[in-house]
Structure formats: C-alpha cells, structure tokens
Image (spheres, rainbow, N blue to C red):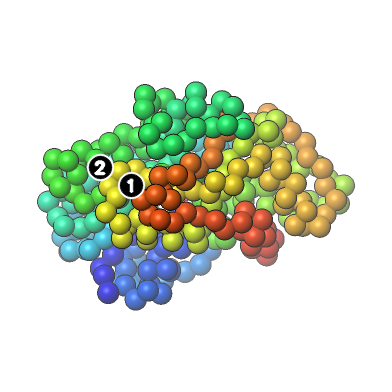
Amino acid sequence: MKRIAVLGAGGFIGGHLVARLKKQGHYVLGVDLKYPEYESTTADSFLLADLRDPKVVADIFSETFDEVYQLAADMGGAGYIFTGDHDADIMYNSAQINMNVAETLKNSSTRVFYSSSACIYPEENQVDAQNPNCSEASAFPANPDSEYGWEKLFSERLFLSYARNYGLDIRIARFHNIFGVLGTYKGGKEKAPAAIARKVAEAQDGDEIEVWGSGSQTRSFLYIDECLEGMERLMSSDFKEPLNIGSAEMISINDLTKMVIAISGKSLSIKNVDGPIGVNGRCSDNRLIASVLNWQPNYPLQIGMEHLYSWVKSEL
Ligand code: NAD
C-alpha cells in the first residue's frame, strides 16, 4: 500500500484516478477547490483547498507521500482555452500551483506525476489536418497555439529543472484529449466529445447539430480507462522525459459527430458554424510510448463514445 496524494482530485481525471488507486488498496488524499461533480469521492481524506497558496501546499506535504499526481490546473475545452478571454487566469493559476508543488517537494523522495498536454506542440506542425506532427521531439523550437499550452510547456521545464538541480523524481505525460463518463459535458468547459454527445442527446429527429469550424479539423481521443493505465505504467517506469499519452486513432470532428449521431439512432444533420477550433490537426504519436513502456493505447473510439453517449443521455 502506497501513500498517494492526488491534486485536482475533484476533476475529471483526478476523480477516476482516486477510484482506481483506492481499488488497488492505496491510501489516497484528494485535494481540490471542489468535490467531484457527478460522484462522491472514494479518497480516504479529501481536502478542499487552494493549491495556489504556498502555505497550503507546504501543509499538505508536511506529511510524507510515496507518490503525488499533480493534475490541478485551470483548464477547459476550446470554448475556455482558445478564446483568449481567460489567458491571464490560466497562466497564473496553473503556474502558481506547479511552482508550489515543485518547490515544496524539492528535497523529498516523493515521485511526482505532472500532467502536461498535447497543446504544447508547435502550431506550424499541426496545420495539415491529415498529417500533424506530435512526436515528443517536435516540441522545440516551441510555438504552442494557446497560453494554456505555453504554461504547460513552462511547467514541464520547471519540473525538469527541479529534477536536474534537486533530484526531484518526476514523470511527465502529455495527455491528448482524454474523455469518458463523469466528465464536464455542459457549462462552457466541456470538450468536443462530451459537447457533441450532449447536443446529440438533446436533439430531436430532423434537428441540426452545430459543430465549430469546418469540421474537417482532426483530433484523437483517449478513453479515461486507458489514460489511467498509461499513467500507472509511466509512474512505474524509469522514463523521466515528457511522454505522449493519447490515442493514435485520428478522426475529424464532423466524423466524430456522425459517429455519435449513428450511436443515437436519430436522424440528424451537421451545421458547421464559427467557433474556436484550435489547431487544424492533432494526433498522438505513439512511437516513443510503444518503445519505452512496451505498451500503447488501443481501445476503440467507437466503444468509448458509446459509453460517453449513454452516460450523458442519462444525466440530462
Ligand atoms: P479538470 O478541470 O476536470 O480537473 C482539474 C482540477 O483542478 C479541477 O477539479 C479544478 O477544480 C482543480 N483546480 C484548479 N485550480 C485549483 C486550485 N487553485 N487549487 C486546487 N485545485 C484546483 O481537468 P482534467 O480533465 O481532469 O485534467 C487534469 C489535468 O490533465 C489538468 O492539468 C489538465 O490540464 C491535464 N490535461 C487534460 C486533458 C484532457 O483531455 N482532459 C488533456 C491534456 C492535459
């Protein structure tokens, strides 16, 4: 049994992670500004606290933990991170949390997992929707298309610096669009799979589903269970450089919408409208994960979307 702290335990990935770690028999402390939205936490202890406060973080780590998962961040879907309206908050809030965690744990033997993002990859490598380059090595020269991505890149380098100078035991994942049940599906911070599932579930036969942009923009989406599996495998490995955790099954947003419409069995059409879309193309490059972990995600998108659709429908 390990002692594990999950920062951001009230969020989507954090909530699922706590449940998995508890099933494995670990002692888990969850920390967040809020409790999980759709299910009560299974953590042994749950602290409602603001991780931007260095004293709060110092207090938490006055006790010893074997592992810390640093998932807390100010984030959301395209409607939150690509409009520019929340840039200052995103950069300040998330950087402050990461600096507090790195500084507080610098002389400890705690293993720290940091959740970075595919949003760190340079914009110019993601112009061709059919042929994006998201290999780990392509991150530099850097040019993320959002301040959210710049903050993630800064914090990767922050944790790498603490590893270099203070021996901080870090693992860094670049998540690519994680989705699944118990995630935000309304309110402006939801991501494309949940937003589309909600729109389709609410629609009546003959309705049009609004999709942002031309719909030809591509992404890959990883189901939460495989994300957790990848996190555990990375944490158990010796690999200390940033690593993609994502699906290599690339799909256009219009095709994703058609998939959900087919799952629903409804007769609906797509209407492409103006909206924030981010880069034209993005897909996880899984060559490095396959070679260093001897494993890569392979759960079919179709099955994940079936789970998500039926959960969102039951929530409405
Ligand atoms: P989420 O927004 O559901 O969870 C983040 C949690 O952090 C929230 O519950 C939020 O309340 C908490 N938080 C924010 N500020 C805080 C503060 N000051 N003090 C304490 N808690 C605070 O996001 P998620 O989808 O679970 O993502 C988890 C991590 O993975 C984030 O760092 C995110 O940037 C990263 N990530 C996620 C995805 C994805 O597709 N879900 C993709 C790339 C990276």
Label 1 lies in ligand 1 vicinity (Cβ under 8 Å)? no
> Residue 160: image x %, image y %?
24, 40
> Residue 297: image x %, image y %?
50, 55
Q: Nearer the viewer, mark 2 or mark 1?
A: 1
Foreground residue among 170 and 18 = 170
Which residue is identified by label 2?
Answer: 159
Q: Tell me the kind of residue under disc 1.
A: Ile
> Residue 43: image x %, image y %?
37, 69
Q: Tell me the kind of residue under disc 2.
A: Phe
Foreground residue among 12 and 160 = 160
Q: What residue is shown at x 27% (from left), y 54% (from top)?
A: 238
Left or right of 201: which side holds 95?
Answer: left
Left or right of 77: which side holds 239?
Answer: left
Q: What residue is shown at x 71% (from left), y 43% (from top)?
A: 255
Q: CA distance from mark 2 to mark 1?
A: 9 Å
Marks 2 and 1 close (CB-CB < 8 Å): yes
Q: Is residue 7 visible?
A: no
SS assignment at label 1: strand
Foreground residue among 95 and 307 = 307
Q: What residue is shown at x 45% (from left), y 39% (from top)?
A: 118
Q: Local crowd at mark 1 within 10 Å, few (<14), some, or many (≥20)?
A: many
- For residue 172, the mark is 1
Q: Vertically, is 216 above or below 189?
A: above
Mark closest to the chain's N terminus, 2 or 1 = 2
SS assignment at label 2: helix
Foreground residue among 31 and 48 = 31
Instruction: Locate the N terminus and report the quarter of the image it occupies.
Output: bottom left
